[in-house]
Image: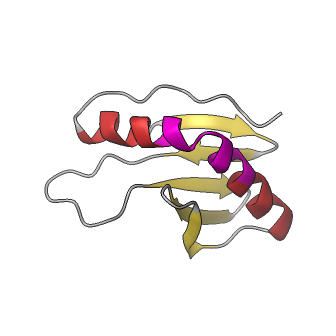
Amino acid sequence: MPELSRFLGIIIRMFMESGERHNVPHFHAYYQNDIAVFSIQPVELIAGNLPRRQLRFVEAWAELHQQELSNDWKLLQSGHLPVPIEPLK
């Protein structure tokens, strides 16, 4: 699963879905032993959990980079590598 960004101990990744799509466009956030899945449009937690502070960081980052996340989703689904996205600073 390609890594899109890394900040404040959080790793953002996105899967390519092979075959028929079964999920809305989304990305995965990893922090220590926690994993969460977020939809891109709108940015919402759809599965998993992160500590509250990291959850807010991921939501803020995703809101700032929503168009880039959508573009990376389209790239991955068409068999191309995604473009890295700037971390939260």
User: 51 above or below 67?
Assistant: below
The quadrant in which residue 11 appears is: top right
Q: Within the magenta stretch, is there residue 68?
A: yes
Q: Where the N terminus falls, by quadrant?
A: top left
Q: In this view, does 61 lie to the left or right of 19?
A: right
**Magenta stretch, main secondary structure class:** helix
What percent of the width, then of the height, locates residue 28?
Answer: 53, 55
What percent of the width, then of the height, locates residue 17?
Answer: 27, 52
Question: Which residue is located at x 22 percent, y 36 percent?
Answer: 78
Question: Which residue is located at x 55 percent, y 35 percent?
Answer: 4
Question: Which residue is located at x 32 percent, y 65 percent?
Answer: 23
Q: Within the magenta stretch, is there residue 13?
A: no
Q: How many labels does the image show?
A: 0
Q: In this view, does 17 lie to the left or right of 36?
A: left
What percent of the width, then of the height, locates residue 12?
Answer: 60, 45
User: 51 above or below 29?
Assistant: below
Q: Which of 32 and 86 is in front in this view?
A: 86
Q: In this view, does 35 lie to the left or right of 31?
A: left
Question: Which residue is located at x 85 percent, y 62 percent?
Answer: 53
Q: Nearer the viewer, residue 24 or 13?
A: 24
User: 10 above or below 75?
Assistant: below
The quadrant in which residue 85 appears is: top right
Magenta residues? Answer: 60-69
Q: Where the C terminus falls, by quadrant?
A: top right
What percent of the width, then of the height, locates residue 68?
Answer: 51, 35
